Image (tube, rainbow, N blue to C red):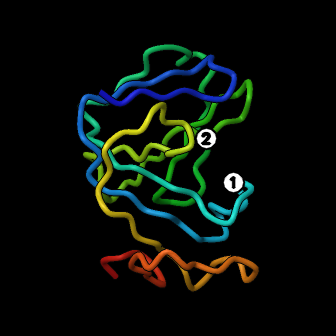
Amino acid sequence: MIKGACQCGNVQYEADSAISDLSHCHCSMCRKLHGAAFATFAAVSKDTFRWSAGEDVLSTYASSDKIDRMFCNVCGSQLIVFYTPEPNLVYLTMGTVDGNPECPPAYHQFTASKAPWHEITDGKPQHDAWPDD
């Protein structure tokens, strides 16, 4: 079981499925929302995901017509992303996942808009946009 929480601990979640996809997103939106060179997301099956605490302090931000992001309105931690073209998945923000769950090989996406001051050196696959485009 995968467990995670926001920084202040008010919001907690669980998922009873394995991580099926692991991506490092370098788009300018993720960089701004995370305050970092990229954001890392882990896909889990939506039907195994549940909030275990703090659902009353969650807010949703529609960052685009295809992406809704949920965050704690106490500490601001972004916890999950819903990508509407993939309705059966929930994307966990890996920074909020507790422990060290087993993960599939990672890849980088939206590298065409990555921060110019960041160099990707890990040898993982890189995609200028969505990997399937």
Residue type at mark 1 is Leu
Q: How many marks?
A: 2
Q: Give the crowd class for mark 1: few <14, some 14-19, many >=20 residues within 10 Å.
A: some
The structure residue drawn at horizontal position 53% and vertical position 66%, both measured from the top left corner, is 25
Picture quarter containing residue 115? bottom right
Asked if the residue at tag 1 contacts the one at tag 2, i.e. Cβ–Cβ closer than 8 Å, the answer is yes
Against 25, is 70 above or below?
above
> Which comes sooner in the sequence, label 2 or label 1?
1
Label 2: few (<14), some (14–19) or many (≥20) C-alpha neighbours in 10 Å: many
Q: Residue at 48% of width from left, 29% of height from top?
A: 4
Q: Is residue 9 above or below residue 90?
A: above
Q: Residue at x 61, y 29 (%)?
A: 6
Question: Quadrant location of the C terminus?
Answer: bottom left
**Left or right: 9, with 14 as reference point:** right
Residue 27 position within the rendered picture, expressed as x and y whole percent measured from the top left? 60, 71
Report helix, strand or loop for mark 1: helix
State the image coordinates of residue 119 (x, y, percent, origin top left): 64, 80
Residue at figure coordinates x 54%, y 26% from the top left: 5
**Which is nearer the eye, 111 or 73?**
111
Residue 33 disc label: 1
What percent of the width, then of the height, locates residue 64? 56, 60
Q: Which mark is residue 2?
A: none
The image quadrant where one finds the N terminus is: top left
Q: Amino acid at mark 2?
A: Gln
Q: Which residue is mark 2?
A: 78
Residue 13 figure quarter:
top left
Whole-angstrom CA distance, mark 2 to mark 1, is: 8 Å
The vertical placement of 16 against 26, above or below, is above
Q: Nearer the viewer, residue 60 or 13?
A: 13
Q: Is residue 118 left or right of residue 79?
A: right
Q: Secondary structure at mark 2?
A: strand
